[in-house]
Image: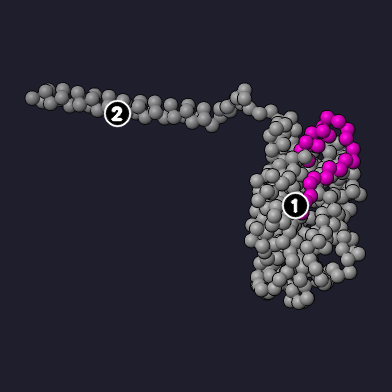
Amino acid sequence: MYIIIKKVGDQLKKSTKRIIYSIGFAIFLVSFIGMIYFGYKTFYIEKESDSAIEYAYHFVLIAEEIDNEYWRLVEQGALKAAAEHEVYLEYLGPPKADNVQLLKLFDRMISAQVDGIIIQGAEGQKFVDLAFKAIERRIPIITVDTDVKSSLRNAYVGTDNYYAGQLAGKTIIENTIGEQYVGIVMGRFDSINQQERLAGFKDAIEATERIQIVGRKQSNITQIGAAQATYSLLKEFPSINTLVGTSALDGIGMVEGLREIAPNKDIYITAFDVLPETLKLIQEGKINTTIAQYPAEMGYEAIKLMIDFQQHDVLNKEVFTQTKIVDQNDVNRFRTGELK
């Protein structure tokens, strides 16, 4: 009996060892396969497919304010042209309009040795110096929306801002009667394009004695800033019966500010740009006219011109994009593309 029990015990021990060895081997096998698989995933670098895009150039678009609706339209046009010409486009800008931050981005992109820089012009010697630095390093510079003629920039693409200001003056001369006391809301006092628009407006109304500017405030190119500026203007100058905005969000903000301080006052409003909300307010009769710029066209033309600079030595060129007066009669035609 003892012998039988011993044999059974030995067999059990052998079976247990076989099971343990089998489990151990299975664990080892799973671990080994896992090591191979995850090592492959970690260190394997997938080869680029034959269809991967090879970009001809790397351009940078530096906006005044990165998430501003107007500048997103400039980006939209630039991206369209970039896609058509196999250009890699980088879009940058400060979170809020700030020339110091804009110039830092400008300097950084020069150091990065990109193939071309499209940037809003900024007043001051620092921009002039950086443009010179870029040209020395054979990086073409195109100013867009705002020019700095004193710099060595290769070209400007955008609105003729002086002419745009004249158009704003023309709308008031032709569409109002009697004494007009004008309050002006500007995006930024130190912005070159705003100054040019103001100069054009002043020259347009100079010979019309019934129209006079009584005050101006700054919106810092924000809707709420324009509303606050409008409130302050009307509080300080109750005689105001005409408002003019010189940057994209001013018209929308002026309507808000007017609603707060004088909702029933009849005021002629001329805005700037054709953002969807601006067109809606024109259709509702809350804004009388706006000066239409074409920011997407600016971006598109700037990319095309920058490609020309890579292939030809084009110097000191100005490309003025379209500028038009849009009123209530034009809104639907403008939206459908009939009015261009």
> What is the x, y in percent for residue 318?
86, 43
Residue visible at 68% across and 53% down? Answer: 331
Would residue 44 be seen by someone viewing this image from the given angle? yes
- Any magenta on residue 239? no
In the rendered structure, which amino acid carries the disc numbered 2?
Ile
- Any magenta on residue 308? yes
Q: Which residues are magenta?
A: 302-325
Q: Is residue 218 above or below residue 143?
A: below
Can you tell which mark lies on residue 93?
none
Quadrant location of the C terminus in the rendered image: top right
Alpha carbons under labels 1 and 2: distance apart: 82 Å
For marks 1 and 2, the one nearer the N-term is 2
Q: Secondary structure at mark 1?
A: strand
Which mark's residue is nearer the viewer, 1 or 2?
1
In the rendered structure, which amino acid carries the disc numbered 1?
Ala
Q: Is residue 297 above or below residue 242?
A: above
Residue visible at 76% across and 38% down? Answer: 303
Residue that numbered label 1 is attached to: 292
- Residue reaching furthest left? 1
- Number of marks present in the image shown: 2
> What is the x, y in percent for residue 122?
83, 53
Answer few, some or many: residues within 10 Å of disc 2's Cα (few below 14, many 20 plus, some between 14 and 19).
few
> What is the x, y in percent for residue 221?
73, 59
Residue that numbered label 2 is attached to: 20
Task: Choose top left, top right, bottom left or bottom right for residue 212.
Answer: bottom right
Kindly indicate whether the residue at mark 2 contacts the one at mark 1 (C-beta within 8 angstroms). no
Residue visible at 65% across and 46% down? Answer: 336
Residue visible at 76% across and 50% down? Answer: 293
Q: Is residue 82 above or below residue 147?
A: above
